[in-house]
Amino acid sequence: MLFLHHLSKTLTLKSLAHPLPFPKPLSSPHSLTQNSTYVNVYMKWKKDPFYDSLDPIHFTPQLKPLLSLKNIISRNPNGCIPISDVSKKDKELRIPIKVSRFMRMYPSVFEEFEGPKHGLPWFRLTEKAVEIDREEREVYGQCMGDLRVRVKKLVMMSKEKRLPMKVVRELEWCLGLPEGFWESDDVKLGGDFEFVDMCDGERGLAVVSNENFLSVLQKNAMRRGDDEAMPIAFPLFPSKGLRLKKKISDWLDGFQKLPYVSPYEDFSHLNPCSDEAEKRLVGVLHELLCLFVLNAIERKRLFGLKKYLGLPQKMDKAFERHPHIFYLSLRGKTCTAILKEAYKDKSAIEGHPLARVRRKYVDLMKESKAILKQRRHNNPRVDDGSSVLDFDLYREEEAKEKNLV
């Protein structure tokens, strides 16, 4: 938690110590004189309530196990299960309390009733939950092709056009893949994919297609009719009250005029310490967040991609150096990177249907608060478990366990 405390005070930003003129854009980045003209300076991190209020993003620690339990119930032929079916899955589902208590915290999703034998508690989905589950299944049926393309783009961004399966699985939720997608017997990725053995003996996923992809920034530039001879600039969305020092602003103006290297293009010609490499890094992070259905991710989950996408060791610092492009939310005692453009310019990045479904689940979860409040009013002694809805505490305990190992 120390890095969060430090981040809440200052963000490291790179800027000019002595502004130097940037070279005019050239038609080929290979012939460009690459400069590294920034040094470390500090600016205060600016809280933005708008991005901190995006519940579909920040409810993820609760939503993921809730949907796992929902899937277990919906897959049952009877549409209901005894609590004994899931009571031992708290560690597997990353639930910090008893599963039964967790389910009782969301009566708007899970309906409890007395089972046929021994009076044991059983659970089924509420009518609203069944309705959203049906919509979710329809969305998956319609969007499976799009989700496969997102996986393909992720793999195509790697240097060798292959990624370890553990890295792909880590991003399964962000990419919108259905739970257990890789474990199912009918995984249909198409002829463009193949499973391979990585050099370290791990199983990997490779793309055998020579298809060329354009990044979201390139597509938007073409849609606007921008001059192809001019470099692509990143859309900027300053948070209210966030002002850059003049020397930083001057550096940013020059940075925007540098040639844009697509995440899907070869970048071996770039000096890793240059501003051009920095622009390529920002482009990769921008494209990654565009691939994720909520256009956001817990920052540490990207660390596994560094080696395979050719990113620098401290690639996560780019989120801090470019606060007009990204927002780092500290809500929930974690650090979540959010792409501002996705929430400020809906025409640039189209919202994914799965994001709408997840928002509906979160809205349904929040209805539980009123239900539990009414229950406590009717019966003050009832223990609904709502007093322990603290996933932040769970993260702290988990961190302690890792430090002891």
Image (cartoon, rainbow, N blue to C red):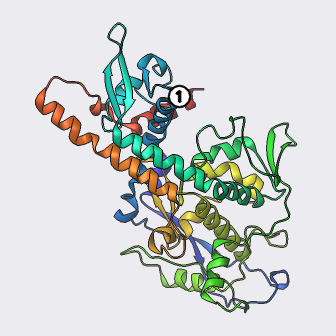
222 relative to 200, above or below: below
Quarter residue 51 falls in:
bottom left
Residue at (64% x, 90% y) in the render: 226
Q: Is residue 48 visible?
A: no
How far across and down, in percent of the image, does residue 312 sit?
71, 60
| Amino acid type, mark 1 | Glu
How far across and down, in percent of the image, does residue 252 sit?
58, 81
Mark 1 residue crowding within 10 angstroms, few (<14) / some (14–19) / many (20+): few
Task: Using residue 209 as the reference point, say whether residue 306 is left or right of it.
Answer: left
Task: Using residue 194 as the reference point, say whether residue 335 is left or right of it.
Answer: left
- Badge 1 element: helix
**Nearest the eye: 329 or 365:** 365
Residue at (73% x, 91% y) in the render: 229
How far across and down, in percent of the image, does residue 349 sit?
54, 70
Label 1 sits on residue: 401
Q: Residue furthest top?
A: 118
Task: Using residue 210 as the reference point, say whether residue 358 is left or right of it.
Answer: left
Residue at (48% x, 73% y) in the render: 346
**Nearest the eye: 298 or 370:** 370
